[in-house]
Image (cartoon, rainbow, N blue to C red):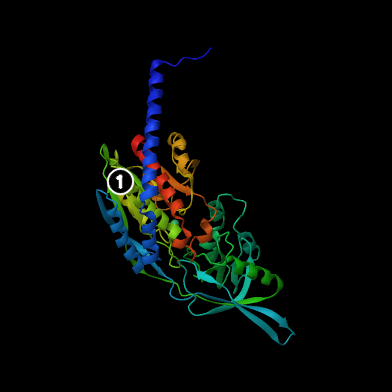
């Protein structure tokens, strides 16, 4: 027998349908405003072309903060300010050199060597070689091989040739899988007496650009120099080592200057019903020093500002307070994100949700959510509202380095914006992460989906 809907259930269904219609129309209007009048692409051009690379502590980062505050103010928040924090100040200190000499022939007495220069970038936070060092190169494919060969590591330059796993469809999985070789590889080799390390770049790219990125030393071990090498050179080194002996002369000059003052740039729309409940949306303003940081994370920065701009353009009055944050230091310290959470905690602020865009300005696919199941289900139910603009894959797990401290310290549920990930690691931390490699439409569609999610969370809460 057919169940009959009670009058109350029917009424609530009608209400839901009306709300859905209303939301879908509002999101459509926001999308139109962004796709016609967006400032995101022009903002990205100024940030990348007029300011450029902006590692925390650098003079360019100071300029970026000033630009960020102005751009934020132009988007029309109720207020905008700097939140000061101390940031690390690492400098590359000079040109990174890796000169490989391969043994071509030997008749016992006379040895002939051939020299090749590999394209390398010192790893971020690494200590310079203090003049040139010369040593034999030995390759290991992973940490297990390093352990197996630990007795022959002493005095060598260790080449970590761990490959990005092509079978992971989401490239961030390949990155998580490989990144330990960059982060901990140098100290793990230093433990057995290595003099230096060269790490295969974390990428699927078909070019030869080296991809730098953060590393950290174990305090108890010698701080040996460390560079990343492009994939073509990595393959060349691999095949050459299979045939003959290779020595290398390696020179880097990275070092830390004293910590300095950095700033999170914050804009805020004050909530009309729950002013003391906060929703945060952000990206990070800093980038590595070797590139313009267009995808990482200029895209997240300009999308964040664009979400503010569109909410204002719609005349939207949020129920909760919404904070738009350009974080000061993601790449080599996450001090910006930590400061933001620390102050929120100290002030007893209630942070109900945070969203970060730090996966590039590519075509939207969805959002990754970290938080309770009931809240996940609630976001999942909005899938159809996001689908027309691309972000319909609502998956479990996600957030961002800058908002992670909010999750840890305050239990805030977190979302990471998930654009298509296939090209991200072609550019990530490499010198080709430039404005020209960001597509205007893809960037804007990212902002559309972020604005839609923020609107829904503000309207319905979690
Ligand atoms: Zn990033």
Instruction: Tell me where residue 256 appears, x and y as whole percent.
Output: 40, 70
Instruction: Give the residue displayed 42% in from the left and 72% down from the top.
Output: 255
Q: Secondary structure at mark 1?
A: helix
Residue under label 1: 313
Task: Answer with the quarter of the image where residue 14 lies.
Answer: top left
Q: Where in the figure is residue 206, as x and y percent of width and height? A: 59, 62
Front-lying residue, 124 or 409: 124
Asked if residue 183 is positioned above or below residue 386 in the image, the reply reads below
Residue in the image at 39% along x and 50% along y: 405
Q: Quadrant of ligand 1?
A: bottom left
**Furthest-top residue in view?**
1
Instruction: Answer with the quarter of the image where residue 134 lies.
Output: bottom right
Return the x and y of residue 285 as percentages of the image width and height: 37, 59
User: Residue 6, relative to residue 103: is it above or below?
Assistant: above
Name which residue lies at 67% across and 76% down: 245
Q: Is residue 310 visible?
A: yes
The percent position of residue 44, horizontal first and vertical second, equals 39, 59
Label 1 packing within 10 angstroms: few (<14), some (14-19), many (20+): some
Q: In the rendered view of the protein, which quadrant contains the C terminus?
A: top left
Tell whether circle 1 marks a residue whose Cβ is less than 8 angstroms from ligand 1: no
């Amino acid at each position: 027998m057919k169940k009959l809907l009670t009058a109350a259930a029917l009424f609530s269904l009608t209400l839901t349908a009306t709300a859905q219609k209303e939301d879908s129309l509002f999101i459509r209007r926001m999308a139109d405003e962004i796709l016609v009048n967006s400032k995101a692409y022009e903002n990205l051009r100024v940030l990348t072309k007029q300011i450029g690379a902006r590692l925390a502590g650098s003079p360019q980062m100071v300029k970026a903060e000033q630009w960020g505050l102005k751009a934020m103010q132009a988007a029309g928040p109720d207020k905008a300010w700097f939140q000061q924090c101390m940031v690390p100040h690492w400098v590359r200190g000079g040109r990174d050199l890796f000169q490989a000499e391969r043994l071509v022939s030997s008749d016992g007495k006379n040895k002939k060597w051939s020299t090749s220069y590999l394209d390398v970038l010192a790893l971020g936070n690494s200590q310079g070689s203090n003049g040139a060092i010369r040593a034999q190169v030995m390759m290991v494919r992973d940490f297990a091989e390093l352990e197996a060969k630990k007795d022959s590591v002493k005095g060598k330059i260790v080449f970590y040739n761990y490959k990005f796993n092509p079978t992971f469809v989401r490239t961030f999985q390949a990155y998580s899988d490989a990144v330990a070789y960059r982060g901990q590889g140098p100290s793990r080799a230093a433990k057995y007496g290595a003099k230096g390390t060269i790490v295969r770049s974390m990428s699927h790219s078909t070019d030869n650009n080296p991809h730098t990125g953060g590393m950290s030393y174990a305090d108890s071990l010698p701080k040996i120099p460390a560079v990343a090498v492009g994939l073509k050179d990595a393959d060349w080194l691999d095949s050459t080592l299979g045939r003959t002996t290779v020595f290398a002369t390696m020179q880097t000059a990275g070092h830390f200057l004293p910590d300095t003052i950095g700033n999170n740039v914050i804009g805020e729309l004050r909530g009309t019903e729950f002013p003391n409940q906060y929703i945060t949306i952000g990206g990070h303003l800093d980038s590595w020093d070797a590139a313009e940081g267009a995808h990482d994370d200029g895209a997240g920065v300009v999308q964040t500002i664009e979400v503010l701009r569109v909410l204002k353009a719609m005349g939207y009055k949020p129920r909760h307070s919404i904070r738009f944050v350009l974080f000061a230091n993601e790449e080599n310290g996450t001090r910006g994100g930590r400061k933001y959470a620390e102050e929120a905690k100290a002030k007893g602020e209630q942070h109900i949700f945070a969203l970060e865009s730090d996966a590039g300005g590519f075509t939207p696919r969805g959002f990754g959510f970290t938080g309770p199941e009931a809240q996940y289900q609630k976001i999942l139910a909005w899938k159809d509202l996001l689908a027309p603009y691309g972000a319909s894959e609502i998956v479990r797990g996600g957030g961002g380095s800058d908002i992670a401290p909010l999750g840890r310290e305050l239990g805030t549920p977190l979302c990471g914006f998930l654009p298509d990930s296939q090209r991200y690691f072609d550019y990530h931390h490499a010198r080709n992460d430039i404005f020209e490699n960001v597509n205007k439409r893809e960037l804007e569609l990212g902002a559309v989906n972020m604005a839609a999610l923020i609107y829904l969370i503000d309207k319905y809460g979690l």
